[in-house]
Amino acid sequence: MKLIITEKPSVAMEFAKALKINTTRKNGYLEGTDWIITWCVGHLVTMSYPEKYDENLKKWRLETLPFLPEEYLYEVIPNVEKQFQIVQSLLQREDVLEIYNAGDSGREGEYIQRLVFMMAKPNPKAQMKRVWIDSQTEEEILRGIREAKNMDEYNSLSDSAYLRAKEDYLIGINFSRLLSIIFGRRIAKQINEERVSVSVGRVMTCVLGMVVSREREIRNFVKTKYYKIVGEFGEEVSSFKAEWKVNEKSEYFQSRLLYNDNGFKKEEDAKTLISSFADKKAIVTELKKSKQKENAPLLFNLAEIQNECTKNFKIKPDETLEIIQELYEKKMVTYPRTDARVLSTAVAKEIGKNLNGLYKNFKDEEVSGFIKKMIDEKYSTNLVKTKYVNDSKITDHYAIIPTGQGLENYEKLPELKKNVYKLIVKRFIAIFYPPAEYNKVSLTLNIENETFTASGKVCTKQGFLEVLKNKSLSKSMISCQRLYGLCQ
């Protein structure tokens, strides 16, 4: 028999569907002729608290710190003990000769499964393999099983997971106890509580410190007014604005009246300079024109899409992750917990499948129109030699992209989740579009050794911007048109 251990029941069902096996649902697992599929339910095993080492450590005292065990103790979490026992009994079955670790394909997923294997002590005759997948589509699941490697090849990942857990444990146990003993009573008095414990964490406390430091900067910031000079030049129809900036020949070079190189401390000093320009002509002393191309941005990793969703939909990073995790489980997107913004060479060579799936199955006029234009204009889908493909910048997983599958679920999604999915789809499609093209111009004007500068760019070909419409950029283009037109 072959045993697969997944991260949760819903994933186990997807593996059963992909393998097309007739299974019988039993208590905590599925069993067929050749395959058994079971699951964890989050963490089944955890690190033991200090009192498991010594009952006297249950009470928090300074003299018992630091707590640094030579060997770490682990235990089964009581409320999931039943599922652990089911998994353990399956791992120890003598007829199970192949065990597939199909936990979440990341460091935390590896840690969860390794703890189970450590505590359950699988059949020593069984061959242990690791299934590593980037999406939950049928093809990817079958590939993951087919190409499963010996689990020992992931020992470095496992070691790093164990080390991180021990670091979190030691910092949390020791510093939480230390600060609670020293400051707990003082804090409790301030908030009228009997007692207070101070929670310290490797990440949590650092982030909180950053928030506090930034808040102090904001509270201590003193607003300072300064006065800039902006001139309007040209005819009424084709006028443009340029900003004064001090230069070495200026009367105000290194003057104490200046706040910085383009502003005065006092309004009256700025007005004095303005009045000196009365009835004087401005001479263009420098004019530069150039053309610029700009490619579509890199694909989404988790941090980048969290930023975009916060900006566009006003949702928290945790909510974004929850949405993308759901899309992943519905086979609509690839693995969400990735720090890569590029694709692997192997995936890039098969990218047509993703595009075809979107074109045929995604019933969205806007997206279908973008893909149709790609086909009509014969845009290249050969990404291998572009900046969007770089094997060296991929650790565990490549960027988040649509799979082109699971689209029967799209219409059932709430509006917010639809919008997040479309955000991923449009970022993906944009990389196949040509670059945006601009005409750039910058000029310098001189009025008796006082200089004004202006610059801008005009979009001549939208390229990928047609997919990733940028409203703020569109507005700035209108103001730059006048400057560019004047310089023709």
Image (cartoon, rainbow, N blue to C red):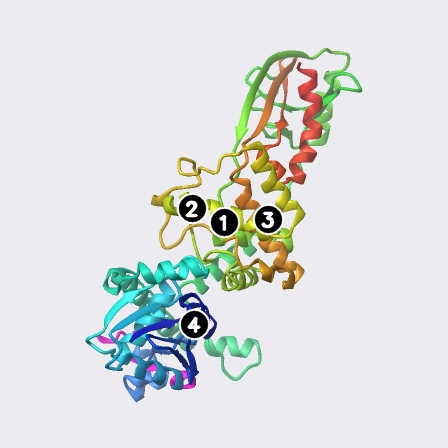
Query: Is residue 52 covered in magenta?
Result: no
Mark earlier in primary sequence (3, 4) = 4
As drawn, is 232 to the left or to the right of 206? right
Mark earlier in primary sequence (4, 1) = 4
Mark toward the viewer: 3 or 2: 2
Label ID, residue 363: none
Residue 277, image quadrant: top right
Amino acid on which the number 4 mark rests in the picture: Ala
Element at label 1: helix
**Labelled pair 3, 2 in contact (Cβ < 8 Å):** no
For label 4, the residue is 12
Label ID, residue 354: 1
For label 2, the residue is 350
Coordinates of residue 295 in the picture (x, y in percent): 52, 34
Amino acid on which the number 1 mark rests in the picture: Asn
How crowded pointer 4 is (Cα within 10 Å; few <14, some 14-19, many 20+) is rated as many
Q: Residue at x 48, y 52 (%)?
A: 400
Mark earlier in primary sequence (3, 2) = 3
Q: Furthest residue to the left?
A: 125
Coordinates of residue 83 in the picture (x, y in percent): 39, 83
How crowded pointer 1 is (Cα within 10 Å; few <14, some 14-19, many 20+) is rated as some
For label 3, the residue is 221
Residues drawn in magenta: 66-81
How crowded pointer 2 is (Cα within 10 Å; few <14, some 14-19, many 20+) is rated as few
**Labelled pair 2, 1 in contact (Cβ < 8 Å):** yes
Mark toward the viewer: 1 or 3: 1
Element at label 2: loop
**Labelled pair 1, 3 in contact (Cβ < 8 Å):** no
Amino acid on which the number 2 mark rests in the picture: Glu
Residue 59, image quadrant: bottom left
Find the distance from the CA under tag 3 to the CA under tag 4: 55 Å
Residue 219, image quadrant: bottom right
